Amino acid sequence: MKSKKPADKLVAEYFKRCFLSVDGLWFVKLEEVFSFDTALDIDVAVWKVLPTIQARTIKKLLCLGDGIENLRTACDFKLSAESYSYELLPLDAGGFQINIHDCPWVKHISKAGREHLLDRIADAVCPVEHETFAREFGSDIAFQHLQKGCRKQQHCVFLFQKKGFRSQEKEANETSLLTPCRLTYGSLLKIYTPRQSR
């Protein structure tokens, strides 16, 4: 009897769970042999490479080139494939923002009873992961982790932006601060009139 091929959705879910499990399992085994700090250092070394593979695979699957717009498309694919709950904000002149409402890594680590380590892991891994991923779409793209959900903030906020980009609002604020003062002695007297002595 010919076996029935599982649905693509089930296959994807199977590999997704294996991916999460093996990441946590090898970390714990490293920690048992060495220490948490050593395991985290090696984890960071892995995440300096893996996002490059992910980005190049997505670029090939979706026929994407370089640039901030293609990075946005790739982030949408990656986060959806990894079962994040997120809001992808529209692209503007400088880049785009992603609000992460539910992170599978936070759920996985919390389920393992290691929630107290989330902050350290996120500080070490998240910037490396997303900076490495973004670099595959251009060396002129910078990543900022503006808000961290594992620190009990409302949610994670990622910002991908062209290096050196300055928003019009920021430039306007800075220009107003640098505008030379044009007040004269006469205009100052109209603003401030000293009290008459009695």
Image: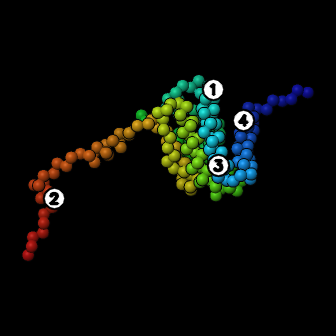
| Residue placed under numbered mark 2 in the picture | 191
Identify the secondary structure beneath mark 1. Answer: helix
Q: Nearer the viewer, mark 3 or mark 2?
A: 3
- Chain-order first, disc 1 or disc 2: 1
Q: How many marks?
A: 4
Quadrant in the picture for residue 190: bottom left
Q: Amino acid at mark 3?
A: Leu
Q: Residues within 10 Å of mark 3 (few under 14, many from 20)?
A: some
Q: Residue at x 59, y 54 (%)?
A: 119
For the residues labelled 3 and 1, the Cα–Cα distance comes to: 31 Å
Give the residue at x 54% y 35%: 134
Callout in the foreground (3, 1): 3
Q: Residues within 10 Å of mark 4 (few under 14, many from 20)?
A: few
- Whether residue 112 is visible: yes
Earlier residue among tags 2 and 4:
4
The outermost residue toward the left is 198
What is the distance, in whole Å, between disc 2 and disc 4 at their CAs?
70 Å
Circle nearer the viewer, 1 or 4: 1
Q: Earlier in the sequence, mark 3 or mark 1?
A: 3
Q: Amino acid at mark 1?
A: Leu
The numbered mark at residue 188 is none
The residue to which callout 1 is attached is 61
Q: Secondary structure at mark 4?
A: helix
Of residue 47 and residue 87, the one placed in the foreground of this image is 47
58 and 92: which one is in front? 58
